[in-house]
Image (cartoon, rainbow, N blue to C red):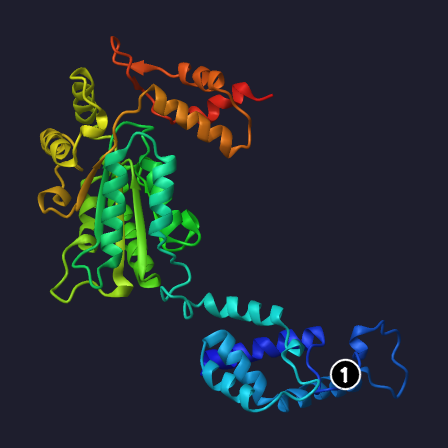
Amino acid sequence: LGLGCCVLIMLLLLLAGSGGLGSPGTTPPPRGPWREERGPVPEGGSWGRARYEAVKKHLGVVGALSKQYWQYLACKVWQDGCEEKEEEERESSPSPGWGFPLVGQDYLEILSAWYCSFGKCCESGDCRIVNNITGLEADLSGQLHGQHLAKEAVVQAVQGFLQSPRPQKALVLSFHGWSGTGKNFVARMVASHLYRDGLRSECVRVFISLLHFPHHKYVDSYKAQLQRQISETMECCRQALFIFDEAEKLHSSLLDAIKPFMAHHDKKGQADHQRAIFLFLSNLGGNTINEVTLDFWRAGRAREEISMEFLEQWLRLELQEAAENSYAHSQLLRENLIDVLVPFLPLEYHHVKLCARDAFLARGLPYTEATLDEVAQMMVFVPEEEKLFSAQGCKSVPQRINYFLP
């Protein structure tokens, strides 16, 4: 009721401010003296009295606001009573001069958008959440190069999680691979297709280990802050996304602080307002992923033949042997809290050319095949003999096209 009153008051203020309120079939009330150049008030006169009378006229008209206006507003904003309104319109013809253009479509759209910001009138139940899986799949297919395993794994995991009515735990994905292979790119894609405001959404939190948690001596303070931010975000958003970049540099205490938010829930599952997705981005496992990809190339086999099952077993083995790393030996792995290990393969020469093409297109610049070759040839390729994989992936490609600007 309180929110409904606020909606009505806001509408009336919008209309009053524009001269939109008026009796049916009459001209709007005359502009009050406060809209005109006032000048000195004559003795015995009262500018305040004139203003009072003008406001009184407006309020008088508000008191006579037709039931038709309210029904139109309720149908437009709350989608309530639309059928009843349509039936009444069919039974009786509207009176001349008593039309809804007086209210103004623009005002209703503004009001509807304002009301929707409270998360009450969207299919998802929260206008900040869009969950565009079709768009995510299409953009990953068109813009993420050389990563057939990551594309499939991310789309399937996210789609399955969002379609589950009551998931038993948060969705936890761990991205692994060399720098520049697309881990951050995919994380941004997930954010932009699940949330209206992408990474800027208040439902998305990004943590970079060396930026947000640089000093181990303050780890207790970091732990309390991290737990508070995660709790507040999950309370504010029925679906939250947390991205941890450079996850291999996270202190073990911080991982312990995160664990309760990812643990399995009771048999009733996770309530809608507690749904959460965690993405961990790490360079760990990159060497194993590269070795497997190189072995396939040497054997004359296409990289697309690499299966998730085959690569995952080698990736897990490397993570288990990385005894000095807290992330690899954290409870996240030991207790199987990570749902999917997502491998990002090293990028080859033709993948770098595709990245260069995308960079030119993104800036609306012309390019030729020769130009794309020049950009790719500026990158360093390894191993020394084969020179097959870009050492930096596509990380510095957008900057390198600056050399080819007209």
Between 307 and 89, the one lying in front of the other is 89
Disc 1 designates what residue? 29
Is residue 247 among what the camera can see?
no
Residue shown at the point (30%, 24%) measured from the top left:
347
Residue shown at the point (49%, 18%) measured from the top left:
371
Please tell me whether mark 1 sits on a helix, a strand or a loop.
Answer: loop
Q: Quadrant of the N terminus?
A: bottom left
- In the rendered structure, which amino acid carries the disc numbered 1? Pro
Q: Quadrant of residue 228?
A: bottom left
Is residue 107 among what the camera can see?
yes
Is residue 167 found left or right of 12 in the rendered image? left
On the image, the x and y values in percent for residue 405 come to: 57, 22
Between 364 and 84, the one lying in front of the other is 84
Is residue 363 found left or right of 45 in the rendered image? left
Q: Residues within 10 Å of mark 1 (few under 14, many from 20)?
A: some
Q: State the residue lying farthest toward the front.
A: 90
On the image, the x and y values in percent for residue 124 come to: 36, 64
Residue shown at the point (12%, 36%) measured from the top left:
309
On the image, the x and y values in percent for residue 336 come to: 11, 46
Q: Quadrant of residue 316?
A: top left
Is residue 85 found left or right of 242 in the rendered image? right
On the image, the x and y values in percent for residue 69 come to: 58, 83
Residue shown at the point (25%, 30%) measured from the top left:
177
Q: Quadrant of residue 150?
A: top left
> With respect to residue 266, does 336 lie above or below?
above
